[in-house]
């Protein structure tokens, strides 16, 4: 879009004719691709790293489609929207009305959804956000879809695993006092109750805390009021004499089945060790904030057996995932991320719709809204009434310094 701004600001510049020739050449090349996908991402701002990951996923999907015999001619337009609001609106309007892509992939942030959703609705061009975690994006317009991993998806999957697959009924929650922690704690508690489970206690801690003893002690106190047991243990000290009252141990048996900790990986190791110190042997459950290879390598035995959920697992034995990882490594000389996968799925789904004859905005919208066998890296999926892509998630467990896929 800087080119158009240059032409408008300097119409008499000696380079104008060359710039116009370049623009005409680009337009000719784009028209050779009958069906256009537009990526509208903040590639030059503070979110550039994540946006680049998304773009690389989109590029892989387009390149993969071009390699397949009989694939429809698909082109990719990339726009950087890290500009002032009015400039962004002008650029987006020009893109939708002049280039007429079949679909737009973007934006990254939930706060940018309303204006883009409104334009998508007016132009009848579907919009897929690859990263905005706002729940129920469809309330902004029925042309809006999302391939992002939402908090609700994580809470539902880990709660279902705990309650239905493990038979757990009672839970405690330890969560960081952040938007991420508060929302996941709330959603997990909601899912547990929906599954006829019970929340014994919930305790928050400040992000960056290293001492969790006060929160753990309050959890124990609440549990002891309900189902927990505290039994004095008669033991002797090394001299063989009976212990004094202050030295006597109390054996605590938790009345709950598991602790849910929607935190980042750096806090889990400390929490797990302090949990063991306070005689809490209940297993740990978590979310995608745990998914760090450093965490897996440095975690001690206190974390072994802990289980969490994520939308992407780079070491998955799934052949489709491994092919994707290898292709990305070869093309970009770096490993893909969750954002890469979400961009890849968005583009791949769009291309699949075009391949099935959805060659207009309305037709592609209908295909996305009604298909329940859309191709994603983790298996067949479909968009729900909320506009979110409901695909299989990964259940991962910590075992001897490694993450192991359970499903």
Image: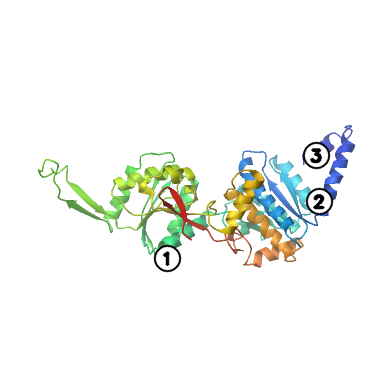
Q: Answer with mark 2 or mark 1, whichever residue precedes in sequence.
A: 2
Q: Answer with mark 3 or mark 2, whichever residue precedes in sequence.
A: 3
What distance separates the C-alpha of mark 2 from that of mark 1?
A: 51 Å
For disc 2, the marked residue is 30
Q: What residue do we see at 58% from left, 55% from top?
A: 321
Q: Residues within 10 Å of mark 3 (few under 14, many from 20)?
A: few
Q: What residue do we see at 63% from left, 62% from top?
A: 375
Q: Position of residue 195 (x, y in %)?
A: 42, 65
Q: Quadrant of residue 80?
A: top right
Q: Residues within 10 Å of mark 1 (few under 14, many from 20)?
A: few
Q: Answer with mark 1 or mark 3, whichever residue precedes in sequence.
A: 3
Q: Nearer the viewer, mark 3 or mark 2?
A: 2
Which labelled disc corresponds to residue 3? 3
Answer whether residue 379 is visible to the viewer in this image. yes
For disc 1, the marked residue is 164
What distance separates the C-alpha of mark 3 from that of mark 2?
A: 17 Å
Q: Position of residue 142 (x, y in %)?
A: 66, 61
- Residue closest to the eye, 258 or 373: 373
Indicate the quadrant containing the N terminus: top left, top right, bottom left or bottom right. Answer: top right
Q: What residue do we see at 72% from left, 59% from top?
A: 68
């Amino acid at each position: 879009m800087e080119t158009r701004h240059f032409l408008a600001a300097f119409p008499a510049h000696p380079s104008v004719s060359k710039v116009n020739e370049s623009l005409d050449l680009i337009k000719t090349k784009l028209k050779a691709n009958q069906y256009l996908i537009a990526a509208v991402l903040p590639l030059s701002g503070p979110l550039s790293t994540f946006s680049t990951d998304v773009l690389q996923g989109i590029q892989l999907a387009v390149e993969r489609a071009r390699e397949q015999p009989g694939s429809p001619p698909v082109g990719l337009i990339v726009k950087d929207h890290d500009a002032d609001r009015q400039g962004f609106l002008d650029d987006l309007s020009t893109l939708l009305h002049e280039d007429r892509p079949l679909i737009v992939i973007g934006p990254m942030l939930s706060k940018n959804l309303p204006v883009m959703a409104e334009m998508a609705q007016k132009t009848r061009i579907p919009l897929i956000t690859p990263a905005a975690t706002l729940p129920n994006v469809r309330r902004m317009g029925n042309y809006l879809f999302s391939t992002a991993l939402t908090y609700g998806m994580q809470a539902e999957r880990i709660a279902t695993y705990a309650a239905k697959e493990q038979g757990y009924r009672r839970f405690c929650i330890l969560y960081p006092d952040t938007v991420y922690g508060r929302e996941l704690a709330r959603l997990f508690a909601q899912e547990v109750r929906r599954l006829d489970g019970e929340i014994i206690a919930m305790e928050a801690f400040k992000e960056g805390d290293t001492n969790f003893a006060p929160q753990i002690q309050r959890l124990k106190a609440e549990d002891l009021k309900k189902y927990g047991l505290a039994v004095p243990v008669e033991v002797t000290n090394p001299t063989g004499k009976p212990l004094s009252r202050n030295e006597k141990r109390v054996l605590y048996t938790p009345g709950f089945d598991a602790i849910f900790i929607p935190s980042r990986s750096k806090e889990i190791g400390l929490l797990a060790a302090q949990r063991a110190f306070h005689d809490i042997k209940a297993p740990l459950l978590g979310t995608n904030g745990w998914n760090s290879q450093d965490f897996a390598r440095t975690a001690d035995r206190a974390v072994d057996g802990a289980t969490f959920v994520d939308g992407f697992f780079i070491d998955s034995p799934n052949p489709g995932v491994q092919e994707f990882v290898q292709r990305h490594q070869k093309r970009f000389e770096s490993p893909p991320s969750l954002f890469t996968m979400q961009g890849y799925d968005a583009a791949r789904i769009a291309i699949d719709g075009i391949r099935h004859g959805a060659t207009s905005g309305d037709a592609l919208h209908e295909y996305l809204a009604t298909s329940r066998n859309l191709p994603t890296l983790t298996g067949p999926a479909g968009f729900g009434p909320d506009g979110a892509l409901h695909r299989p998630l990964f259940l991962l467990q910590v075992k001897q310094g490694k993450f192991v896929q359970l499903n």
